[in-house]
Amino acid sequence: MKLTLHHVSYSSENVARMDAFYRDVLCLDNVSEDIPKREVNKGYAGDIAFITDGDIQTHIAQKDLTVGFKTGHAVNPVERGHIAYRTDDIQAAMAHLDKMGIQYSDWGHTAAAEWHQIFFYDPDGNVIEIHQVDK
């Protein structure tokens, strides 16, 4: 199981304002590829901006405190944001978390059609995502 940092996600009440800040102040660009097809009818249809420094993406998602309830998942990745790692073997990642006794929420393809996503908490309550791109 190999992990690589893929994106940092912020939650915001005003996605357009945050998007403009990161593009204008930090000179980040819009993401033109590697954007998942969103599953807006499965519980989260909020606005999202995708920007990048050329290597790592930044996602700015509209805050939604109820998405966990609407999707039936214990971890809400748009409550306050998260850091995301991409893996080449999501099953190995889940087996590793099981072995370590780390509880996670398997979102499968709830939010992204081509990404199998899992979310869990670090010891301080920060949300971590691991996802695999399904080919």
Image (cartoon, rainbow, N blue to C red):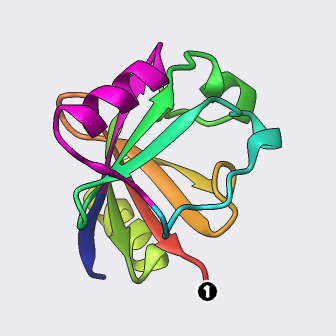
Q: Is residue 118 visible?
A: yes
Residue at x 68% of width, y 23% of height: 69
Quadrant assignment for the C terminus: bottom right
Residue at x 37% of width, y 49% of height: 51
Judged from this view, the residue extending furthest toward the right is 41
- Above/below status of 21 relative to 95: above
- Above/below status of 108 relative to 124: below
Tag count in the figure? 1
**Where residue 130 appears, x then y in whole percent?**
39, 60
**Where residue 96 appears, x then y in whole percent?**
32, 70
* Magenta region includes residue 120: no
Question: For residue 74, which quarter of the picture?
Answer: top right
Q: Is residue 79 visible?
A: no
* Magenta region includes residue 22: yes
- Above/below status of 102 relative to 82: below
- Above/below status of 31 relative to 125: below
Amino acid carrying mark 1 in the image: Lys
**For the magenta stretch, what is the residue range?**
7-31
Question: For residue 123, which quarter of the picture?
Answer: top left
Residue 12 versus residue 133: which sits nearer the camera?
A: 12
Residue 95 versus residue 77: which sits nearer the camera?
A: 77
Left or right: residue 92 compared with residue 115: left
Residue at x 40% of width, y 71% of height: 95
**Where residue 8 appears, x then y in whole percent?**
29, 46
Q: Which residue is mark 1?
A: 135
- Label 1 environment density (alpha carbons within 10 Å; few <14, some 14–19, many ≥20): few
Secondary element at tag 1: loop
Residue at x 53% of width, y 75% of height: 133
Left or right: residue 120 compared with residue 37: left
**Where residue 124 appears, x then y in whole percent?**
18, 28
Quadrant assignment for the N terminus: bottom left
